[in-house]
Image: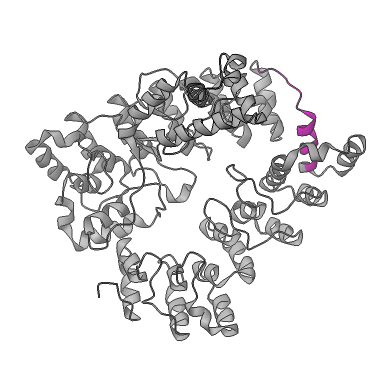
Amino acid sequence: MPARPLPNNPSLEHLRKDARRLRNAVLASDADALGQVQEFHPRANQAISRFALADAYLVTARTYGFASWTKLKQHLVEIEPFIWNPPPVPNPESRVDVFVRLACLTYAGWHRSNPVKALRMLAYDPELAHANIYVAAAVGNVAAVRTMVDRDSALVNAKDGPLHWEPLLYACYSRLDPANADHSTLEVARLLLSRGADPNAGFLHSGSYAFTALTGAFGRGEDWSNQPPHPEWDRLATLLLEAGADPNDAQTLYNRHFEQNDDHLKQLFAYGLGQDKGGPWLKRLNDPSVNPSSLLVIELCAAAQHDFLERVKLLVDHGVDVNTRGLRNSRTPYEEALRSGHHAIAEYLLQHRAKKVELDPLETFALACIAGRREEVHARLSQDPAILERLGHQGRVDMLHRAVDAKQHDGVRLIVELGVDVNGMVPGTGLDRGALHNAAGWGGLEMVKLLLELGADPGLRDQPYQSTPIGWAFHNQQPDVVEYLLAFATIFDAVRCDGVERVAALLREDPPRANTHDDGGNPLVFYLHPELARLTEMIQLLAAHGADFHARNKDGQTLLDRALARGWTDFANTLREYGARSVSD
């Protein structure tokens, strides 16, 4: 197997324990452990006969792509100062902390409505803009930042403030579009760079993912609508690149690869994307195989998979090798296009020197299933009855997900009829949710209805977020799907998804539900949030059934405490109208 990336927040102590476990397994003649030694130890046969702890350390290091245990330890020492994890929800008494968490995109449950809430706080308390250099940078208070760095030049690259970042990062991750003409986060960034701020400032999110100043400027990500770019992202990105920011920004490429717009790629190519610029962040990643060239192969494979023909052309025009296999799954761009059914891209790649390859028989069988070609599928099964079994659980679940994402209704029905688990999931992969989650999030109402007909569980929870399909529909703004799934919703999902009528029906059946707690110890009222269109109706309904708005969650907070900590001022005021109190009241 290929070398793998280090886990999130890598710990030397945990890696030592892994090495000890490997040694014990080898001494016990465990087949998998012996196979690992054969693959990664340079003197495997000799080492196995007397497998010392030093051998286990060497194999462990090499499985993560490092030449030796010493090299691995050195890497952990080098990245330790840059490891960053989102801080906990701030104390509601600290207005500075609350404000910054609203103003700056943190990639930790951030919502697109936060900047409006932050500006409201600022209008109520203008002195926030002068609290310290970190708040001033997030606000775009150029005059205050200038005064502070004039007084103490060391502040320019000092990590501190609510997010423990350099001032430049607060400006680049700020999403405020201020009404005050004297405020500009772009101009704050310009000032800081002129005073010596590092244009490659950044942090390793969860110890693994390099989020730089440039990443902050470009924004976006998996939660696309809740991760907007900087209000002046193009000018800010140009400013950073002119100052020396490395255009080989792995996280920017990932965050922006979900949609077809290529403006970010054109801008990065203009400053040397794909060429080694000596930037610090690729070396700090937890995967030594990543380099400027491999980043672009990943982009080309993803573009082929998503049918982004113009992006494919742009990448090929910039010399990306069409025959290099991607790091994520060892497939070439041509194979990605072919297995995704994007024949125009496959043909374009062939015209640009891609090697024509025949897909694996398992893959051609999967494609026939996805397309719903019944006669072909049954003919293949007659010839090879074990082919479905050889796909394995992950291959079968992947096939179903691909059919759902391609909106191949006939294929979905055929696959489930063949015995594939309609609720199957694969932990630790992109298949860590049910097919119904994908359908609810972006597959459309008809696909949702089909999957329910075929036995999909509307109460199934995905593994990363522990959310149900209706939660995915609500988050991805699919109102018709939400409305349909409300008939299956628990009272917790019904409250969270604005289902006033469903909540009313459930409370009629069982009035004490108004004070029920979820499996994590959170009272029902904690599912209220300010984005509910019918918030007042929902609060009135719960209040009429005796809901306790003073109930505390497992952390000892009341709903009002949480609202204040998140800067939900209007929501907090509405709660107070119904007698809600904080712990300190």
Q: Image point 36% across, 47% down: which residue?
A: 86
| Residue 277 place in picture, x, y as percent | 37, 18
Give above or below for 168 relative to 290: below
| Residue 112 place in picture, x, y as percent | 40, 54
427 sits left or right of 68 in the view = right
How many badges with numbers are in the image?
0
> Which quadrant does the N terminus fall into?
top right
The answer to if 366 sits in the magenta stretch is: yes
Task: From the viewer's side, name the closer residue of 34 and 290.
Answer: 34
Colour scheme of the rendered structure:
one colour
Viewer can see residue 322 = no
The answer to if 210 sits in the magenta stretch is: no
Give above or below for 205 relative to 472: above
| Residue 425 place in picture, x, y as percent | 65, 49
365 sits left or right of 429 in the view = right
Q: Image point 55% across, 60% down: which residue?
A: 471
Viewer can see residue 24 = yes
351 sits left or right of 201 in the view = right
Displayed quadrant of residue 485: bottom right
> Which quadrant does the C terminus fall into?
bottom left
The magenta segment is 354-369
Task: From the viewer's side, name the closer residue of 13 and 11.
Answer: 13
Outermost left residue: 151
Task: From the viewer's side, name the closer residue of 367 and 61.
Answer: 61
Q: Image point 68% across, 46% down: which residue?
A: 401
| Residue 247 place in picture, x, y as percent | 39, 26
19 sits left or right of 412 in the view = left
